Structure formats: C-alpha cells, structure tokens
Amino acid sequence: MARILIIGAGGVGSVVAHKCAQAADVFTEIMLASRTKARCDAIAADVKTRTGQTIETAQVDADNVPELVALIKSWKPELVLNIALPYQDLHIMDACLECGVHYLDTANYEPPNVAKFEYKWQWAYQERFRDAGLMALLGSGFDPGVTNVFCAYAQKRLLDEIHVLDIIDCNAGDHGQPFATNFNPEINIREVTARGRYWERGEWVETDPLAWSMNFDFPDGIGEKKCYLMYHEELESLVRNLKGIRRARFWMTFSDNYLNHLKVLGNVGMIRIDPVNYNGQEIIPIQFLKALLPDPASLGPLTKGKTCIGCLMQGVKDGQDKSVYVYNICDHEACFAEVGSQAISYTTGVPAMIGALLMVTGVWMKPGVCNMEELDPDPFMAELNRRGLPWVVR
Ligand code: NDP
C-alpha cells in the first residue's frame, strides 16, 4: 500500500507510470508530475485505458526546491521516483530530505554546464540520508541498474571473484529515422561524445571518444555487431564494490549511420553545450538540436528489433577459472504493444519500478545512499523475470 510521486513525463517516465499502475497491489496512489503537465495528462489517460488505474498529475519545476517541497508536502508520498533529467538529481534529493521521503533515480548527477557525470555529488548525501533514516537508491535503470544487479548476482551465486567485467549494451532495433536518440538527446549525445574510460589494475585509463571497438556476437539471432568502448557511470561504483576486480569496461553498439551524423553535428558545432549568441539571443546548440530531433517517446510505434544488454564476467569459482554472461533480450515491438514505448524506455522504466517496489515493501530498505550492487540481488532478479525483463545466464 504505497503512495508515490513520479517526476518526469518523458519516454522513461511513461513506462514507469504504466508499470507502477500494473502493480496496483503495491502502488495504490500514484502521482505523475513534470515540467509540462499536458504530457503527464496524456500518459495518465493511456494508463487509464490500458490498466483501468487512475494516476494524479501535477506541474512542477524540479529545479525549484521550494516548489518541489510544496508538491511533496501536499501529496505526501513515501517515495519520490526521479525520472526527469540528471540535472535535477540534487534538487530532488534536497526536497526529499526536507520532506522526509525516500528517493530513487536512474542516472547520476551531471552539472548542466560541464559534460561530466560522477557519483561524488550524490555520495556526499550519504550521512544526511542515513541520519534521517531515509534511503536514496541511485541508478535503478538498466545500465546503470540491472547491470549492477547482474554483477552482484554473479558475485553472490556464480563466481567467488570477478576479475574482468565487460558490460555490453546492444540496441539492434531500427526506428527508420535518419538520426534519432533512444533517450533524451542532450544526455545521450553528451555521454557518447565524452572521452572513453575504463578501469585496469587499480586505475582509470582514458581513450579518445569511441576510439576503441570490438566485434561481439550477440545471442538470440542478433548476431555480430561492432561495439565501442565508452565511459559509463556504473563502472565508478562497481570497481569499488566488486571483490577482486582487475579490469572493468563498458561497450555500446552504434551504427555507422549514427556515428556519421554525430561526427558532422560535432564538426559544425551543433553539439556544443556553451551558449552562443544568435540574433541577440543566447542559445545552447545541443538544446536547439534536441528541439529538432525526434522525441524519443515518439519512436515507440516505429522501432522494430531487439536490445541485448548484459555483463560478460571472468573470474574464479571454487579455484577454477570461469566465465559467465548474464543478459536480457528485449523486443521493441512487444514493449510498444504492452505500454506504448520502445525498448530503451522500457528497459529503463521497468527496473525503476522494481527498485521502488522493493523499497516500499521493505525488502530493499537501507537508510543512506545506495548503489544497486550493494543490495541483495536475489529479489530484484526474481522481479525482473516477473515484470517483463527475463534474464539468461550462460
Ligand atoms: P525525456 O527527455 O524523454 O524526459 C525527461 C522528462 O523530464 C520530460 O518530461 C521533461 O519535461 C522532464 N523534465 C526536465 N526538466 C525538468 C524540470 N526541471 N522539472 C520537471 N520536469 C523536468 O528523457 P528520458 O525519459 O529519455 O530519460 C529520463 C531519464 O532516464 C534521464 O535521466 C536519463 O538519463 C535516464 N536514463 C537512464 C537509463 C538507464 O538505463 N539507467 C537509460 C535511459 C535513460 P518536458 O516534457 O517539459 O520536457
């Protein structure tokens, strides 16, 4: 019997709202609030049609802490799910502390004017959350999120030590658009164009953006694809929390078409994040580009094919070398049929709902700021199978 507030009504927020409404035995009162209330209302109407559940909606500027506090105090949720953008993380955490409610998000804080994400800003809230008896669950999406849980599961059940970790994220779907991103374009492009970084023998090694690639043969008929080494936020917490880790890397597949578009956009300055004066007005090129690109939430009816995201781990079990690959396959069209969204939003929104479910039912309730691999993976793995993201161990 939980009352929750979801903030953010984009592609992922829509999936979170639908999946929480499907779990009406747990989430009895749901409010969806965002910057543009009309988007919340459209999602609530679709939820009503698909599940019969009523979702309340509200307008909020999540960068305005007093406004957030007023909304939280009037709705009185026990948990706030931050499904807006990484820029809002600290404001929403501040509001949760002020109101005495638990917090969950899917992406770590990123300052708007520097393309850099790091956990240090959110880890700095550890004592304040712990002392208030509140929990902040960080990164409860797929990657970060499920990938952290796959590692924790391997550490608990499959290997005694994980020495080498490769997280491999493949979107083999096709939306038929010349160029579009599967989640918020600004956040996505900032991440993809950042310098690569991986962990080896106790230190971070940097690479030029997308300078390293490998071919990987994905299961379930997807076949061989080229994957590029990137820095991804879950590496930062995993290298702290995995016993014996020697190397940790993150890879993502991109088509040549996507990379060519990105290269041209970069060359002409369209992905700059600093303000540019245009006709007496300041614009930030990447934000203008976002306004031109397809809304990720609109890709649902267009996208066909599958995603495959998983963790390939080498280590030891009972003194023997052992490799395991834990992964999920998700089908874009099946996601659209179920909740009206493509698989990237789906694979992020379902784990956010599961994290919330485990928190409000007390299964995962630990005061303080937690990364996903710090909690017992078993109940989360069981819920993945039950809630639409079944996994495979090879
Ligand atoms: P969208 O851009 O589609 O949606 C973001 C939503 O947040 C929009 O509804 C937007 O409002 C709202 N919003 C933005 N700023 C504010 C604000 N100041 N106050 C209130 N609402 C605001 O993004 P996605 O749904 O694609 O992504 C959501 C989050 O999920 C991001 O943080 C992203 O990084 C994360 N993510 C995590 C993944 C993972 O696996 N862990 C994978 C993919 C995404 P408006 O409608 O007015 O624009």
Image (spheres, rainbow, N blue to C red):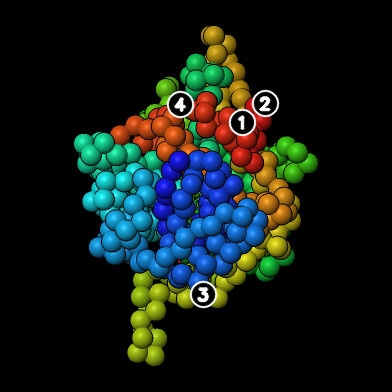
* Marks 1 and 2 in Cβ contact (< 8 Å): yes
Residue 363's place in the image compared with 119, above or below, is above
Q: CA distance from mark 1 to mark 2?
A: 6 Å
Q: In this image, 306 relative to 148: left or right?
A: right
Can residue 121 be seen at all in this image of the molecule? no
Q: Nearer the viewer, mark 4 or mark 3?
A: 4
The image quarter containing residue 54 is: bottom right
Q: Tell me how far mark 4 sits from mark 1, CA to CA.
A: 17 Å
Q: Earlier in the sequence, mark 4 or mark 3?
A: 3
Quadrant of the rendering where the C terminus is positioned? top right
Q: Nearer the viewer, residue 334 or 359?
A: 359
Marks 1/3: CA–CA distance: 37 Å
Which of the labelled discs sits on residue 291, or is there none? 3
CA neighbours of label 3 inside 10 A, class few (<14), some (14 to 19), many (20+): few
Badge 4 is on which residue?
376
Q: Could you tell me residue 290's position as x and y percent?
A: 51, 71
Q: CA distance from mark 2 to mark 3?
A: 42 Å
Q: Is residue 188 above or below residue 251?
A: below
| Amino acid identity at mark 1 | Val
**Residue picked out by circle 2:** 394
Q: Are marks 2 and 4 in contact (CB under 8 Å)?
A: no
Residue topped by disc 1:
326
For mark 4, give the secondary structure: loop
Label located before the other in sequence (1 or 2): 1
- Quadrant including the N terminus: top left
Residue at the extreme right: 221
Amino acid at the residue labelled 4: Asp
